[in-house]
Image (spheres, coloured by chain):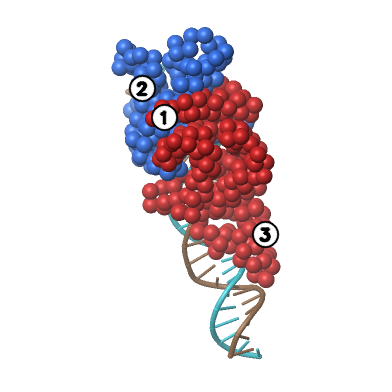
Chain colours: A blue, B red, C cyan, D brown
DNA sequence: TTGAATTGTGAACAGTGCTTAATTATAATA
DNA sequence: TATTATAATTAAGCACTGTTCACAATTCAA
């Protein structure tokens, strides 16, 4: 049994996050339990509550990690030297591939439903917002006369759309749910959307 | 305690579905438990398992009801005498209003994640497909030269997009999540999509 | 009226999130 | 070095969860 000298507070925090992530990747949210996580790292339940407020809090931190990973991919070096249109299509491509690479971990972001009392932490909301901001920045050059609020609207609707296709694909609610088909759908949506978006008259 | 003469098998089935629906509407999936449902109708747990395979099966049947209700709205009388474009916008309008009228009951459709062993029942898959079919039928006249498979692709991507906007709106993951704003986003997506869809050259 | 068939129960099992009194190991002090 | 104080960790316990199944209650048929 682990004693306190074995690991620092921060080490335990990381160990819990890693173990929890592994469980989620293999068995989804359903497989995630406080006892399973802590026994996997050689501790007992109580320890988890010294580090995280509760299981929901742990999930929030897993999701923050996931969002950060996705953010890094969406802003990586391979995104340089692309036309703005190509840039947008690449973003969709990255998103779908990310989701299909680890469906459980990706879906966890959207499986967490906060009750009214226990609101979404502000710092976490920013993590979500960051993704939309990338899309906004990509859309801006495609319609230079657009107001900021219309850019926000465009990014919101397009990216929520990309999410929707991805989610219905992964949860088998589309007529055809393979990754390649979902990639096609995202490209198709983006393409049609862009035509309307670029050609608009103010 | 209820005795067998009190209610027929089918009556109990309906009572369970009604009670479960009420719980879901008020407290979401988290509030739904076999004991709560059955005690609400004056029975005990065991009875539920005489009527439904398990809790997942019950949820599937709640969702089937929800999808049927939505289907009726999307094919109702008020849908007649509309231009094809108006028809499509009206579908989006109905969908968003339906989701916001009972967020928990609507979200339940997408909260159910089937494991690989326990696949989605075929009859239930048809219920999902029906919704996409309505969209397909509405899109067809807007691009008469389209192949069936492209119509399917268009309906899938657009409607999954509408779903995505709705879900992120209801779960507070958009910069602005009010119903009116979500309605705007759906209209915006549909509008831009349609421009690309109608103007396409084959 | 008796026996068979059906209907419903509720205890039991193994699990869940979370709390907390008690215990143990370390660090600081005398 | 021995003792005390502090912090880390445990393990038991609470009120739940889904699911099963031997049993009891009720109805129907003979």
For this rendering, which residue is in front, B81 or A195? B81
Report how far apart the C-alphas of labels 2 and 3 lie in the structure: 56 Å
The image quarter containing residue A185 is top left
Q: Which mark is residue A37?
A: none
Asked if the residue at tag 3 contacts the one at tag 1, i.e. Cβ–Cβ closer than 8 Å, the answer is: no
Report how far apart the C-alphas of labels 1 and 3 lie in the structure: 52 Å
The residue pinned by badge 2 equals A90
For this rendering, which residue is in front, B126 or C20? B126
Name the N-terminal-most of marks 2 and 1: 2
The residue pinned by badge 3 equals B42
Marks 1, 3 in one chain:
no
Q: Is residue B47 visible?
A: yes
- In-image side of A115 versus A52 (left or right): right
**Vertical placement of B146 versus C26: above or below?**
below
- In-image side of B195 versus A92 (left or right): right
The image quarter containing residue A4 is top left
**Vertical placement of B61 versus A126: above or below?**
below
Q: Residues within 10 Å of mark 2 (few under 14, many from 20)?
A: some
Measured as percent of width and height from the top left, residue A97 is found at 35, 30
Q: How many circles with numbers are drawn on the protein?
A: 3
Q: Residue lying furthest top in this view?
A: A145
Q: Chain of mark 3?
A: B
Measured as percent of width and height from the top left, residue B110 is found at 51, 41
Report how far apart the C-alphas of labels 2 and 1 lie in the structure: 13 Å
Residue for point 44% across, 50% down: B120
The image quarter containing residue A179 is top left
Asked if the residue at tag 3 contacts the one at tag 2, i.e. Cβ–Cβ closer than 8 Å, the answer is: no
The residue pinned by badge 1 equals A188
**Vertical placement of A62 versus A169: above or below?**
above
The mark closer to the camera, 2 or 1, is 1
Marks 2, 3 in one chain:
no
Residue for point 52% across, 20% down: A154
């Amino acid at each position: 049994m682990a004693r306190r000298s074995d690991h620092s507070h921060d080490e335990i925090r990381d160990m819990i996050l890693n173990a929890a992530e592994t469980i989620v990747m293999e068995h989804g949210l359903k497989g995630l339990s406080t006892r399973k996580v802590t026994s996997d790292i050689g501790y007992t339940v109580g320890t988890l509550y010294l580090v995280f407020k509760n299981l929901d809090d742990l999930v929030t931190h897993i999701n923050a990690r996931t969002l950060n990973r996705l953010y890094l991919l969406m802003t990586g070096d391979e995104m340089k030297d692309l036309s703005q249109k190509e840039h947008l299509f690449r973003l969709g491509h990255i998103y779908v591939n990310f989701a299909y690479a680890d469906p459980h971990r990706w879906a966890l972001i959207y499986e967490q439903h906060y009750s009214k009392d226990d609101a979404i932490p502000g710092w976490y909301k920013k993590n979500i917002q960051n993704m939309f901001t990338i899309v906004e920045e990509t859309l801006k050059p495609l319609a230079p006369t657009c107001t900021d609020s219309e850019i926000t609207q465009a990014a919101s609707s397009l990216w929520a759309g990309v999410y929707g296709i991805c989610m219905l694909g992964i949860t088998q609610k589309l007529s055809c749910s393979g990754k390649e088909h979902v990639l096609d759908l995202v490209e198709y949506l983006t393409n049609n959307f862009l035509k309307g978006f670029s050609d608009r008259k103010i």
